[in-house]
Amino acid sequence: MASSKHNAEFEIAVGGEPYVWRLHRLPGWSSDAAERRGMAIAVRHIEGQREAVVEFPPGPQPRYGAPQLKASQIDPKVVTTAIASAIAAGWEPLSRGKTVVIVVDASGA
């Protein structure tokens, strides 16, 4: 039987509006030569369809054998700040269109 990967979605309110977010990408090595990529979260308004992918910096390299990051371990304050930064950068969550990619710092700003 085939196993399915299911990324859990979490609800969060930012500025009184409800959003849904999920862990889009774990931090790890890129396919480019010797480059690490940070985690990324995908966010959408609960009533909208347009997503924003918010990318974070890679941070320190994890120790060998360290457990992988889980979405439940991400601080909700960082997610709230990242969503607010995406909106400030021009993402319109209730509009239609392509997914927007926004790069933020480690604090989500």
Image (cartoon, rainbow, N blue to C red):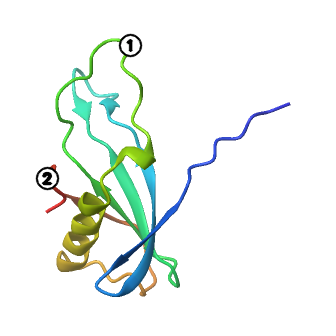
What's under tag 2, amino acid-wise?
Asp
- In the rendered view, does 78 fall on the left or right side of 67? left
Say which residue appears at 56% left-offset and 53% top-offset.
Answer: 8
Crowding around mark 2 (Cα neighbors within 10 Å: few <14, some 14 to 19, many 20+) is some
Which of the pair 42/31 is nearer the observer?
A: 42
- In the rendered view, does 16 fall on the left or right side of 102? right
What's under tag 1, amino acid-wise?
Gly
Which of the pair 15/101 is nearer the observer?
A: 15
Say which residue appears at 25% left-offset and 78% top-offset.
Answer: 87
Looking at the image, is mark 2 or mark 1 earlier in the sequence? Answer: 1
Say which residue appears at 28% left-offset and 68% top-offset.
Answer: 80
Q: Residue 101 lies in what quarter of the image?
A: bottom left
- In the rendered view, does 16 fall on the left or right side of 106? right
Q: Which residue is mark 1?
A: 65
Percent from the top left, x then y, of residue 39?
32, 43
Crowding around mark 1 (Cα neighbors within 10 Å: few <14, some 14 to 19, many 20+) is few
Q: In the rendered view, would you say 57 is above or below 41?
A: above
Residue lying at the far right of the rendered structure: 1
Q: Which residue is mark 2?
A: 105
Q: Residue 109 lies in what quarter of the image?
A: bottom left
Q: Are marks 2 and 1 in contact (CB under 8 Å)?
A: no
Q: For numbered disc 2, what is the local secondary structure?
A: loop
Say which residue appears at 33% left-offset and 29% top-offset.
Answer: 28
Percent from the top left, x then y, of residue 50?
45, 75
Alpha-carbon span between mark 2 and mark 1: 26 Å
Location of the N terminus (image quadrant): top right
Residue lying at the far top of the rendered structure: 64
- In the rendered view, does 37 fall on the left or right side of 105? right
Percent from the top left, x then y, of residue 30?
31, 30
Q: In the rendered view, would you say 106 is above or below 102?
A: above
